[in-house]
Amino acid sequence: MRVVIAGGHGKIALLLERLLAERGDQAVGLIRNPAHITDVRTAGAEAVVCDLEAASSDDVAVLLAGADAVVFAAGAGPGSGAPRKDSVDRAGSVLMAEAAERAGIRRFVQVSSMGAGQPPQPGAGEVWAAYITAKTAAEADLHTRDLDWTILRPGGLTDVPATGRIRLAPPPVPAGTIPRADVAAVIAALLDHPGTRHQTLELVTGDSPVATAVQSIP
Ligand SMILES: NC(=O)c1ccc[n+]([C@@H]2O[C@H](COP(=O)([O-])OP(=O)(O)OC[C@H]3O[C@@H](n4cnc5c(N)ncnc54)[C@H](OP(=O)(O)O)[C@@H]3O)[C@@H](O)[C@H]2O)c1
C-alpha cells in the first residue's frame, strides 16, 4: 500500500512511517522544510517537499498519483496562533481531501482531536477555540466529500512508549491521554480496515489490543 502522509515530519507521522515501512508498505511524507528529508528517509519513507499553506489542490493531486491512501497528520503545533490553526489544521486538511478527490484516492484518515465536533468550551482561550473550530471545520469538510474517510480523534498526546492497549469508539469517549506511538499503530490498522469508513472514532488509552479494537468497529 502506498500511503501519503501530510505533515510527514510530525511526531505521529514519523512513527507511522516506521510502522508502514516495517510491514512492507510504502510511505510518503509531505514536509515543508527540506531539512527534514533525512529524518523522513531514516523512518523508511519517501520525502516530498510540499508546503500545505502554499500548494494548490492541483499540485497535491499530482503528488497523490498512484497512492492507495492519504493520512492527514499535520498540525500548526503548540507554538502557533489562531491564524495557523485555520491555515494548517482546517485548510491543510481541506486541501488534502480536495486533492484526494481529484486524484481518485478514496481512502483518507484524518487525525482530528477529541473536543472537535462541538463548540469550544467557553473560557478555554482564543487559540484553543481556534484549534477546535479548525478541527471541527476540517471534519465537516470531509463529511461532504466522496471519499472513504475515517476521522480519528485522539485524546491528549504523550511521548511515552506504546502500550498497545486502547479504547477506540464513536463519541463520546471520556477524556484521557494516548501515546503518539499508539495513535500511529491505530492509523496503520485503520488503513487496513476500510470498513471503518465514514466513522468518527475517539481514542484514548484503554484495555483492548489495537487490532481487536479496530476490528470491533462495526
Ligand atoms: N497535542 C495533542 O495533545 C493533540 C491531541 C489530539 C490531536 N492532535 C493532533 O494530532 C496531529 C499530529 O500531532 P503530532 O504531535 O504528531 O504533530 P506535530 O509533531 O506537531 O507535527 C505536525 C506536522 O505538521 C507539519 N506542518 C505544519 N505546517 C505545515 C505546512 N504548512 N505544510 C506541511 N506541513 C506542515 C509540521 O511541520 P514543521 O515541523 O515544518 O512545522 C509538523 O511536522 C495534529 O493534527 C494535532 O493537532 C494533537
Image: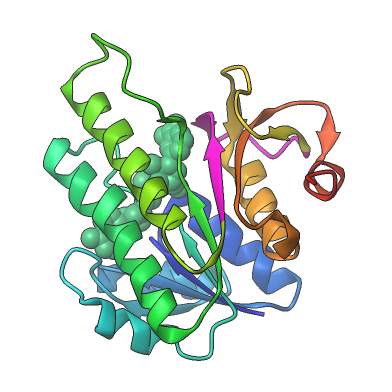
Q: Residue furthest top?
A: 123
Does the rendering let one see residue 81?
Answer: no
Residue 93 on image: x %, y %: 35, 58
In the rendered image, the quadrant that contains the N terminus is bottom right
Residue depicted at x 74% and y 65%? 192
- Pick the residue in front: 193 or 197: 197
The image quadrant of residue 189 is bottom right
Residue 47 on image: x %, y %: 41, 78
Residue depicted at x 32% and y 60%? 94
Does the rendering let one see residue 89?
Answer: yes
Considering only vertical position in the picture, is 207 above or below 57?
above
Was residue 152 drawn as part of the magenta stretch in this picture? yes
Residue depicted at x 66% and y 42%? 182
The image quadrant of residue 133 is top left
- Pick the residue in front: 150 or 127: 150
Residue 208 left/right relative to 185: right
Considering only vertical position in the picture, is 26 above or below 141?
below
Residue 91 on image: x %, y %: 25, 56
The image quadrant of residue 150 is bottom right
Considering only vertical position in the picture, is 23 above or below 155?
below
Residue 105 on image: x %, y %: 52, 79
- Pick the residue in front: 186 or 106: 106
Considering only vertical position in the picture, is 33 above or below 114?
below
Per the rendered image, the range of residues in magenta is 150-164
Residue 127 left/right relative to 166: left
